[in-house]
């Protein structure tokens, strides 16, 4: 009997380690031959700890499981969900990037290969740099960290740059509230990120890579470090990758908790041991990045998707999606929602389908009021716009921002004026201080919203002007995008701002 129990942070927070220990003790007491395999999560967080049992005829899912459920679990009397693939939330997904998450032992390279790992790298080894970059370009892959910049164009710029040393930098500083896709990959399928970074190195001529990983992810740090060690020992990293005589090596660097270091130039400063502040552009990091050398800076999901593209071909990946948004989007459903978790699907699904159908509405049972898409810098989307398809340009046309594809759900008890204030306060706290519109504008923004809360309606035009200045004048997205949540709250939920005035009167 094999039991698959997640070691993902979310599952552990909900008691997965206790369940694993209870299984071990109960099996020992019964003298049962039980193998416990710790995996990543399948991404259905409301069912965690989700335990899968294989008694010889396939894996059957049970969850959420507690330590007290273990005797019934081993007896075969505990009610289950059948195969995970049959659970409606999971069955509707198109799992490409996350195909192995929750399926394999994250630190078993042989298990990784058994499920399609290293196929893409072996193919890439036989291609020229130009052919590798062309494959990425043809796939239509865009940056999954938030900006949505075409990955192939970035790689081509670095490939064509002349320099004695080039670098691949993975931005794993996943600081947006309600997002966890990067962490899920690093904890559940780290070799796919490593493989993607090696292919990127072969494509642009880089021999060194860094994973800039936030200190708040201790489990991901431990798993990535061990995965890199294993990959190096097995010849998938180092001086002679899979016997190809080509070299690429990498290491993890841990950030110190600054949200602004999710911005690529701040990240590079931090990586160099400097204060994490934004650099003015140009020069672009693709030409003068880490230590002044040409550098590819890509998000975890972008790099982790590269092996899929090379395993199945660019056209296979490009066949998913809509418009200029090709492939799959990894939606992270969080907040006040009945069924939170990760949902990977082709671009084009509507916001309403995600929140009401997949997410099951609010956990509180009250009506949905808004969804913030794209983290703390994303706009609040009202129910009236829930027909909006999730794609970069499509959401932008509705005044939204896809960002890292995090969705935070709010019910009708939320005060949108307070949420607008939180956005400005967040910017004030996290600003690196490099530019005046962000450093000063956010502080003035908090003060202006407080004036509105006290009933000063004349402060509303001032808030609008302030947001325009921040959008146009900030050096990076922190100050430039903070007006998205502020103005969306004001424009879509004016009654929340008017109520404050009436209360004051």
Image (cartoon, helix red, strand yellow):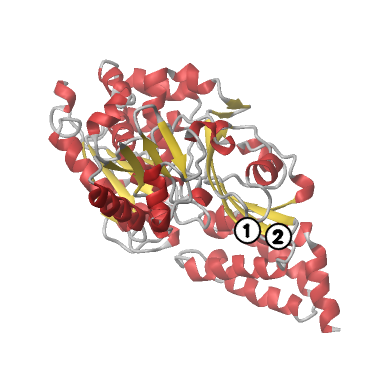
Q: Is residue 16 visible?
A: yes
Q: Is residue 134 found left or right of 339 in the rendered image?
A: left
Residue occupied by mark 2: 411
Residue occupied by mark 1: 336
Q: Earlier in the sequence, mark 2 or mark 1?
A: 1
Total count of labels: 2
Q: Position of residue 234 (x, y in %)?
A: 15, 32
Q: Secondary structure at mark 1?
A: loop
Q: Say if mark 2 contacts mark 1, CB within 8 Å.
A: yes
Say above or below: 78 vs 317: below
Rendered image quadrant of residue 185: top left
Viewer-proximal residue among 366 and 172: 366
If the image is split into quadrants, where does the N terminus sit? Answer: top left
Q: Secondary structure at mark 2?
A: strand
Say above or below: 277 vs 237: below
Q: Position of residue 26 (x, y in %)?
A: 29, 52
Viewer-proximal residue among 317 and 477: 317
Q: Position of residue 48 (x, y in %)?
A: 46, 50
Q: Residue at x 65, y 77 (%)?
A: 447
Q: Residue at x 29, y 31 (%)?
A: 112
> Alpha-carbon distance for marks 2 and 1?
7 Å
Rendered image quadrant of residue 499: bottom right
Q: Position of residue 190 (x, y in %)?
A: 31, 40
């Amino acid at each position: 009997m094999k039991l698959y129990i997640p070691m993902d942070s979310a599952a552990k927070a909900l008691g997965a380690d206790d369940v694993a220990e209870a299984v071990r003790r109960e099996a020992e007491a019964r003298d049962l031959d039980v193998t416990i395999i710790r995996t990543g999560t399948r991404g259905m967080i409301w069912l965690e700890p989700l335990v899968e049992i294989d008694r010889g005829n396939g894996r059957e899912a049970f969850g959420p499981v507690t330590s007290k459920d273990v005797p019934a679990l081993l007896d075969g009397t505990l009610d289950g969900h059948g195969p995970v693939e049959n659970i409606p939330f999971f069955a509707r997904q198109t799992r490409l990037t996350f195909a192995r998450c929750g399926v394999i032992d994250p630190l078993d390279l042989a298990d990784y290969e058994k499920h399609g790992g290293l196929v893409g790298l072996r193919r890439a080894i036989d291609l020229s740099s130009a052919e590798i970059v062309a494959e990425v370009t043809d796939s239509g892959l865009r940056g999954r960290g938030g900006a949505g910049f075409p990955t192939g164009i970035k790689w081509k710029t670095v490939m064509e740059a002349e320099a004695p040393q080039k670098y691949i930098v993975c931005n794993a500083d996943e600081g947006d509230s309600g997002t966890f896709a990067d962490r899920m990959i690093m904890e559940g399928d780290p070799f796919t990120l490593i493989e993607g970074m090696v292919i990127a190195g072969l494509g642009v001529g880089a021999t060194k890579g860094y994973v800039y990983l936030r200190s708040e992810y201790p489990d991901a740090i431990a798993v990535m470090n061990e995965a890199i060690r294993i990959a190096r020992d097995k010849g998938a990293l180092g001086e002679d990758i899979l016997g190809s005589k080509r070299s690429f090596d990498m290491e993890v660097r841990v950030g110190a908790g600054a949200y602004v270091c999710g911005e690529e130039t701040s990240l590079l400063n931090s990586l160099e041991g400097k204060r994490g502040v934004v650099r003015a552009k140009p020069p672009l990091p693709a030409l003068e990045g880490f230590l002044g050398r040409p550098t590819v800076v890509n998000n975890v999901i972008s790099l982790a998707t590269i092996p899929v593209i090379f395993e199945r071909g660019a056209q296979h990946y490009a066949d998913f999606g809509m418009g200029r948004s090709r492939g799959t989007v990894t939606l992270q459903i969080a907040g006040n929602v009945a069924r939170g978790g990760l949902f990977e699907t082709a671009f084009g699904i509507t916001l309403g389908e995600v929140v009401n159908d997949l997410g099951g509405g609010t956990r509180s049972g009250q009506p949905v009021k808004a969804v913030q898409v794209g983290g703390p810098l994303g706009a609040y989307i009202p129910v009236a716009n829930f027909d909006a398809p999730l794609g970069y340009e499509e959401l932008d046309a509705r005044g939204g921002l896809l960002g890292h594809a995090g969705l935070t759900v709010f019910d009708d008890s939320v005060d949108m004026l307070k949420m607008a204030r939180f956005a400005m306060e967040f910017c004030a706290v996290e600003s690196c201080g490099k530019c005046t519109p962000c450093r000063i504008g956010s502080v003035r923004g908090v003060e202006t919203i407080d004036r509105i809360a006290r009933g000063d309606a004349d402060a509303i035009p001032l808030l609008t002007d302030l947001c325009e200045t921040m959008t146009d004048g900030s050096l990076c997205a922190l100050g430039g995008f903070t007006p998205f949540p502020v103005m969306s709250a004001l424009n879509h939920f004016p009654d929340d701002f008017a109520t404050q005035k009436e209360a004051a009167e």
